[in-house]
Image (tube, rainbow, N blue to C red):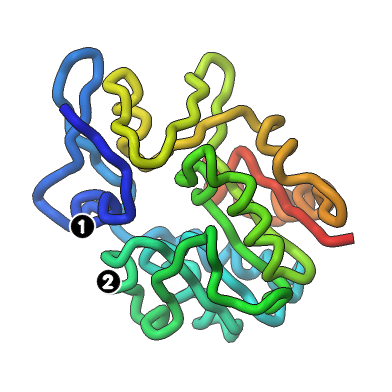
Amino acid sequence: MEMLITPEYYDAEYYGHSDKKKPYMKDGKLEHYASYQSYGPWSGWDYIISAIKKIFDPVKILDVGCGTGSFVHYAINAGLDCTGIDYSQWCIDHPYKKAKGHIFKADALELPFEDSEFDFILCTDMMEHIFWENVQDTINEIYRVCTDTIFFNIACSRDNDPVYKLIEGRLVPEHLQHLAVAGHVTVIPHNEWGNYLIFIPWYEDKDSQEWFRAIMPFGVIQNWIDIFIMRRL
């Protein structure tokens, strides 16, 4: 079975808003992907936004890879100035209520914003969706539009998990389809991500990472294992 990851891949089937599910091969058998979003809205954003306000006191926020705008919705509800971008047209056409008019179709490789336009950028569960050859340019572009803080949460390989770096425009090998069906096209270890994220004038603010984890209810971010909070010197 052929699998090709493109912006159009992120549609109703992917987000669990269709009777159909994304097909993929695993161990020679055809299976179907059940998105976690099939189970309804996630209630953790209020806690996360409260922590972000307490630690960083942001003025203007950008959510890169915003999906249907769940974070943007809750951020605006909390009185924050927040914009989101995603390269899935389906997401932009199916926004959360308060995200409507605040999320836009754009590619993280070419953000439609001025240099240093935002003081806080959220980038959760997005970098693993960037094809390997575009990773460094995407990081550079995110850094370009930020003056202070970038919060990354990235799905990384752990222990004996496969490490892989897929190339844009190529079919996903069958032996990786059960992993890539979630849209994960670059899966590398935590330390390797650090090699790409940390360079002058940006450093990893581990004190803020510890503070964030300390004030968050564990159940809210138990799957947020690989957080990088990057600050500008």
Query: Which quadrant holds the N terminus?
Result: top left
**Which disc is residue 98 wearing?**
none
Which amino acid type is shown beneath numbered disc 2? His
- At 75% from the left edge and 75% from the top edge, which residue is drawn? 57
Q: Residue furthest right?
A: 233
- Crowding at label 2, few (<14), some or many (≥20) Cα neighbours within 10 Å? some
Residue 189 coordinates in the image, percent (x, y): 62, 28
Of residues 222 and 155, the one nearer the viewer is 155
Q: Secondary structure at mark 2?
A: loop
Q: Can I make out residue 39 in this image? A: no
Kindly report the distance in space between the C-alpha atoms of the residues bearing marks 2 and 1.
Answer: 9 Å
**Which disc is residue 12 wearing?**
1
- At 51% from the left edge and 32% from the top edge, which residue is drawn? 187
Marks 2/1 in contact by CB < 8 Å: the verdict is yes
Which amino acid type is shown beneath numbered disc 1? Ala
Residue at the disc numbered 2:
94
Of residues 210 and 108, the one nearer the viewer is 108
